[in-house]
Amino acid sequence: NIPEKTGFQIEIYNSLGNKVRTISNYGNSLGNYNVNWDGMDNSGQLVPNGIYYCHLIAGSVIDIKGITIIR
């Protein structure tokens, strides 16, 4: 949920704190969005099983959620 009129960026980090994927510039208005991560890093390779952290940055809003990849 984006509570203000702004674009947003999503960054995915692995459990070591390394950024593995950036998804950016979705939308420019407030409201609810669904964004699906395909489990690939920025170079197009599938990330290994493990715990990842999704950072949402939208104007003054920053939110972090955990993601577990199990294939």
Image (cartoon, helix red, strand yellow):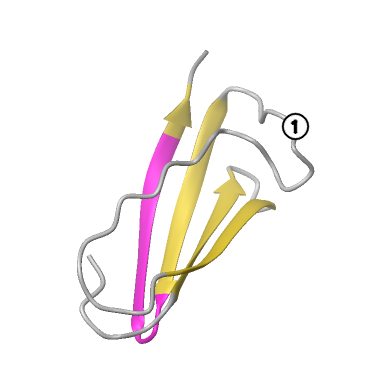
Element type at mark 1: loop
Q: Point out the image quarter for the N terminus.
A: bottom left
- Residue of label 1: 45
Residue ID at (79%, 43%): 43
Residue drawn 24% across and 77% down?
30
Magenta stretch, overall SS:
strand
Which one is in front, 47 or 27?
A: 27
Q: Residue furthest top?
A: 71
Q: Residue at x 38, y 79 (%)?
A: 28
Q: Residue at x 68, y 28 (%)?
A: 46
Q: Which residues are magenta?
A: 58-67
Taking the view exactly as shown, the residue that stands out farthest to the right is 43
Q: Is residue 30 left or right of residue 26?
A: left
Whether 41 is drawn above or below 31: the answer is above
In the image, residue 59 lies at what x, y percent? 39, 85
Q: Is residue 49 left or right of residue 70?
A: right
Horizontal and vertical percent for residue 31?
Answer: 20, 70
| Residue 57 lies in the magenta stretch | no
Q: Position of residue 2 (x, y in %)?
A: 26, 72
Q: How many marks?
A: 1
Q: Observer-nearest residue: 8 or 60?
A: 8
* Placement of 16 over or under 67, stated as above or below: below
Which percent across, then down, holds residue 66? 39, 44
Mark 1 neighbour class, 10 Å CA radius: few under 14, some 14 to 19, many 20 or more: few
Q: Is residue 15 above or below residue 2?
A: above
Lateral position of residue 21 relative to residue 50, left or right: right
Q: Viewed as shown, does residue 62 lie left or right of 51? A: left
Tell me if residue 59 is in the magenta stretch.
Answer: yes
Label 1 amino acid? Gln
In the image, residue 64 sits, relative to residue 66, either above or below, namely below
